[in-house]
Image (cartoon, helix red, strand yellow):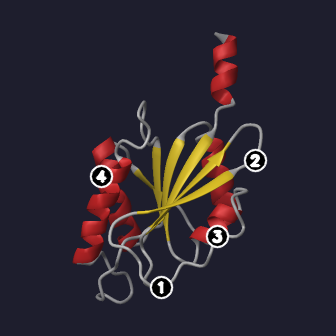
Amino acid sequence: MGLAWFFESQATTTVIFVRHAEKALQPADDPGLSPAGQRRVAELTRQLRDADVIAGIDAVYSTPYRRTEETARPIADTLGLPVNTYDASNTEAIMEYIVKEHKGKIILVVGHSNTLPALMANMGASKRVPPIAEDEYDNIYIVSIPWFGKTKTIRLRYGEPYIP
């Protein structure tokens, strides 16, 4: 039993990062999702509900804005998980907390175009993550943090493609 605990505690932690889906134009200070954003979230939920064939996503995090919460909520509800809110102004502290709290688990983090690259960089992911354009919503970044070895960053695309 001690050996099983050791290997479980040393398992790879996987963090899935997505930007909120397309936002509505109103209200300007804290918009929810547009119809296009709601369609994108339905596709994201379809993609992620079985992300791990054994156990699935273990935790969901979102900033406290309507557009991020509305992006995170459907997948959290599908998996029977709460949406944990985080303050993106301290990217180093939040990523340290998430990785420590959910070691060996799969975590979904919903953020913003201007915060996701810093969040990923602060957990040892590629520092070459390109800037996310204002109208670019189709990225899924998967960051794998092994207990030993190099952190890997994978980028996938989903839903309506971004065309620069």
Mark nearer the N terminus (2 vs 4) = 4
Helix, strand, or loop for circle 4?
A: helix
Q: Which residue is painted at 42% across and 82% down in the image?
A: 163
Instruction: Identify residue type, mark 2.
Output: Lys
Q: Which residue is painted at 69% across and 14% down in the image?
A: 3
Q: Mark 3 points at which residue?
A: 129
Q: In this view, does 92 lie to the left or right of 134?
A: right
Q: Is residue 79 above or below residue 90?
A: above
Q: In which quarter of the image is residue 102?
A: top right
Q: Quadrant of residue 119?
A: bottom right
Q: Mark 1 points at which residue?
A: 134
Q: In this view, does 27 lie above or below 64?
A: below
Q: Name the residue under label 2.
A: 150
Q: Is residue 95 left or right of residue 21?
A: right
Q: Name the residue under label 4.
A: 46
Q: Nearer the viewer, residue 79 or 101?
A: 79
Pair 3/1: label in front: 3
> Residue 123, image x and y in percent?
70, 56
Helix, strand, or loop for circle 3?
A: loop
